[in-house]
Image (cartoon, grey):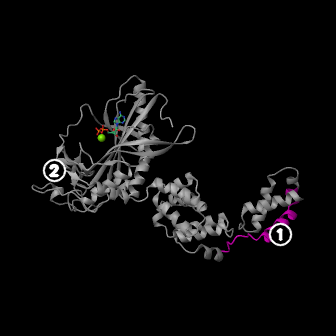
């Protein structure tokens, strides 16, 4: 998709991801969210004199999983450095982060995007580096008083920063890259990546250049956008601003900006006339992080199935169209539910369509999560089998969907109790069709005069006799056969 007619858009993303550990990166304080402020701190988090950091091995393993799953090279030695700056939520006066020698470099992800012709195109987005670092605390600005409080529960929580090459060319590509990255990190268990809890935060660097130019334009960085949709919208808004400026003969100045989603506006945070100087140096309290070749291979071998491989397997084993399988993989839970349904003998294609359309629509409408529905995959499989066997119409199945999701139970029993069993008995349908044809000579005559639509009216009459419990397609077939024979 072309993002702008006059300029080529260049986007590079920096993503901060919270690793799924129980404790912090350099201390035994628990990783928590939403607890009372300052209840999860140790002398290390508080930067008390003499407190020494001890590296959390679990965090290293999760970071390595993330790196290997994104095709990075994991380095046998990486170095933790001090990034010095002053901020009230950073009591040490520096953040520990890997700088010159990061854990991993040179990875990539392949993403799928729609091109101008509506075809799906694959493009490869380079990953420059993945490094480990600790999170900072949180400043709480209480609106009612002129005071700022500091909560250090978050200080020292393990993060990885995933820096991409400036390889994306449209907001949609940036969105596709983020969604893919998000799915991979979750599937390998590196992070829960819950965006609402700030576990997956994105900074988007955007610049424009004339089509055909090989030099990069000056970028501006949109800070901390935390939903896929907003990242795309923020980049779109930023492209608009830069294009307007350049179109008027102006110049883009490097800057850090924010995005106000409510107003769909970009606002200036700070201009970056001169680069920040963090006076990085290796942290003398921490020895270089060493990982053996065996350990790397062990972690690589133990990686679970990645979304892309799962896609291929779903297409292959269940004869799904690629687009159908992709829709299931939008959410790992959806794909899991699907596989459990198929294991319980649900017809695969019908199950895929039902989940990604009907169920997703219902969940969205009721603002619910699939994980919280009452119905089991086995019960759902029963429902779809009844449809497949012609015992329940698609319409009746749709009527039972809320019961299934909300309460759970046996769809076959509901069908019997509520008298929903479809009239699929050919003989019965045949008789009803004959009756209708006899009762509606006018409609029959107009059909015969070439008004094909009158069959719809006749269908409606037969459906009424079945109280809506027949397959409309089947009724239509029977009617047309009879009308043609008249
Ligand atoms: P910093 O750490 O100062 O933000 P980096 O050089 O590490 O700077 O780049 C950060 C991100 O910005 C990377 O994802 C990179 O791909 C992207 N980037 C760099 N230059 C440009 C540019 N001219 N246009 C768009 N993105 C860019
Ligand atoms: Mg940056």
The x, y position of residue 276, in whole percent, is 22, 37
Q: Sort mark 2 into few (<14), some (14-19) or many (20+) by Cα contacts within 10 Å.
A: some
Q: Is 139 placed above or below 347 here?
A: above
Please identify the quarter of the rendering in which residue 382 is found: bottom right
| Element marked by disc 2 | loop
**Element type where label 1 sits in the image:** helix
Q: Residue at x 21, y 48 (%)?
A: 79
Determine the CA span between mark 1 and mark 2. 86 Å
- Percent across and percent down for residue 284 are 13, 49
- Tell me which segment is drawn in magenta: 418-444
In the rendered view of the protein, which quadrant contains the C terminus? bottom right
- Could you tell me residue 353's position as x and y percent? 58, 58
Instruction: Please give the label number shown on residue 92.
Output: 2
Residue drawn at x 49%, y 70% is 374
Chief secondary structure of the magenta span? helix
Residue located at (14% from left, 56% from top): 52
CB under 8 Å between discs 1 and 2: no
Pointer 1 residue: 431
């Amino acid at each position: 998709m072309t993002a702008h007619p006059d300029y080529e858009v260049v986007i590079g993303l920096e993503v901060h991801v919270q690793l799924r550990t129980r404790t912090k990166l350099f201390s035994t304080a628990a990783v928590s969210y939403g607890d009372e402020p300052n209840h999860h701190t140790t002398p290390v988090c508080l930067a008390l004199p003499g407190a020494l950091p001890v590296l959390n091995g679990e965090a290293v393993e999760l970071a390595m999983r993330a790196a290997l799953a994104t095709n990075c090279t994991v380095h046998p030695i990486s170095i933790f450095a001090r990034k010095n700056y002053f901020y009230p939520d950073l009591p040490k006066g520096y953040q520990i982060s890997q700088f010159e020698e990061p854990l991993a470099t040179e990875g990539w992800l392949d993403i799928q995007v729609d091109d101008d012709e509506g075809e799906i195109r694959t493009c490869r987005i380079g990953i420059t580096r993945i490094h480990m670092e600790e999170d900072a605390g949180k400043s709480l600005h209480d609106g009612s008083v002129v005071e700022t409080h500091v909560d250090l529960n978050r200080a020292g929580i393990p993060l990885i920063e995933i820096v991409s090459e400036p390889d994306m060319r449209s907001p949609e590509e940036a969105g596709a890259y983020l969604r893919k990255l998000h799915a991979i990190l979750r599937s390998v268990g590196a992070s829960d990546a819950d965006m609402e809890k700030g576990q997956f935060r994105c900074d988007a660097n955007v610049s424009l250049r004339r089509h055909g130019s090989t030099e990069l334009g000056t970028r501006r960085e949109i800070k901390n956008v935390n939903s896929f949709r907003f990242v795309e919208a923020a980049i779109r808004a930023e492209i608009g601003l830069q294009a307007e400026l350049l179109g008027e003969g102006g110049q883009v100045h490097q800057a850090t900006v924010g995005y106000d989603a409510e107003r769909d506006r970009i606002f200036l945070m700070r201009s970056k006339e001169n680069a920040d100087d963090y006076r990085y140096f290796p942290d003398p309290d921490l020895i270089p992080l060493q990982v053996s070749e065996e350990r790397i291979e062990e972690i690589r071998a133990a990686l679970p199935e990645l979304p892309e491989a799962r896609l291929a397997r779903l297409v292959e084993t269940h004869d799904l169209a690629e687009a159908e399988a992709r829709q299931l993989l939008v959410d790992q839970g959806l794909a899991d539910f699907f596989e459990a349904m198929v294991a319980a003998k649900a017809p695969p294609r019908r199950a895929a369509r039902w989940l990604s359309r009907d169920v997703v629509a219902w969940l969205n409408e009721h603002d619910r999560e699939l994980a919280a529905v009452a119905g089991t995959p086995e019960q759902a499989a029963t429902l779809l089998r009844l449809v497949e066997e012609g015992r329940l119409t698609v319409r009746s199945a749709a009527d039972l969907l809320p019961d299934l999701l909300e309460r759970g139970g046996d769809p076959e029993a509901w069908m019997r109790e509520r008298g929903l069993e479809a009239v699929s008995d050919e003989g019965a349908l045949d008789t009803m069709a004959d009756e209708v044809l006899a009762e509606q000579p006018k409609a029959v005559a107009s059909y015969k005069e070439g008004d094909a639509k009158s069959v719809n009216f006749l269908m409606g009459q037969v459906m009424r006799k079945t109280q809506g419990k027949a397959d409309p397609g089947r009724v239509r077939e029977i009617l047309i056969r009879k009308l043609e024979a008249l």
